[in-house]
Image (spheres, grey):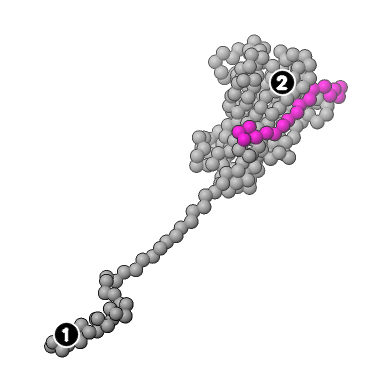
Amino acid sequence: MRKKALVCQVVVLALALMGFGFAKWSDSVVVRATAQSGSVKWGIFDESVWQLDEGTDWHSEMEGGMLNYDQDTEGKDVGSTSVEVTDANEDGVKDTLDITVSNAYPCYFNEITFDVINAGTIPVIVQIPELTWMETESELESGVVYYLCSNGSIISEYDDGFVSPEENGAVIEVMFQDNVSAQQHPGEVLSESICFHVLQPAAQNDQYSFSLSIEGVQWNESPIPAGSVVD
């Protein structure tokens, strides 16, 4: 019996010298995971900007009826509109239309259309656009007529204090249309438009400037849900 025990001790010692260990059986697995986030890149497609006034002036005769318009029957080309696409928040993507109306006169009408493109890898929600007039900023609900007043205010017929365009001193009425709250997928292009109409209180041979800014926000961070705004 002692001989067997001695043999076992010798074997154990030999194995120990050969580098074998008798710790608990164990092994380990190392997992390395890589997470890659998507990117948001959204803005106005510069080459898509187009305006109705490309020559003969267009007129609209009715306040609040801006979609009833036609070209000047005498072929006058007096009023003009310039549009510049800019990056207002300096994030590297153009998001703002700077609009200047020159030689404005009552009834002058114009419509500006443009495309917004989702050039990123994440779906976005198109936000409510914001209009800047003088020192005032205001959100524009799609399909609602807003009045730009000579005192620098922006008002709609639904606001407290609205009486009429004339009595509120409105010089221009504007309306934004299309795609507010739409979910826009990567690579998708959507068309937007803003139209405006110069009103009777406008000064002769004057120049008016206003800006329209629009934003696309990552779908799961948008303050407005997809499809929540219906024209």
Does the rendering let one see residue 72? no
Badge 1 crowding class, 10 Å Cα cut-off, few under 14, some 14 to 19, many 20 or more, is few
Residue 70 drawn at (x, y percent): 78, 26
The disc labelled 1 sits on which kind of residue?
Answer: Ala
Q: In the orientation shown, which residue stands out farthest toward the front? A: 17
- Residue picked out by circle 2: 208
Residue 188 drawn at (x, y percent): 63, 45
The residue at 56%/18% (across/down) is 159
The disc labelled 2 sits on which kind of residue?
Answer: Tyr
Q: CA distance from mark 1 to mark 2?
A: 106 Å
Question: In the drawing, what numbered circle is on residue 5?
Answer: 1
* Image position of 46 with respect to 136: above or below: below
Residue 100 drawn at (x, y percent): 73, 25
The residue at 66%/27% (across/down) is 211
Residue 118, quarter of picture: top right
Of residues 106 and 21, the one drawn nearer to the viewer in this rendering: 21
The stretch of residues the image draws in magenta is 72-90
* Image position of 35 with respect to 19: above or below: above
The residue at 17%/88% (across/down) is 4
Q: Secondary structure at mark 1?
A: helix
**Is residue 231 part of the magenta span, yes or no?**
no
* Image position of 47 with respect to 206: above or below: below
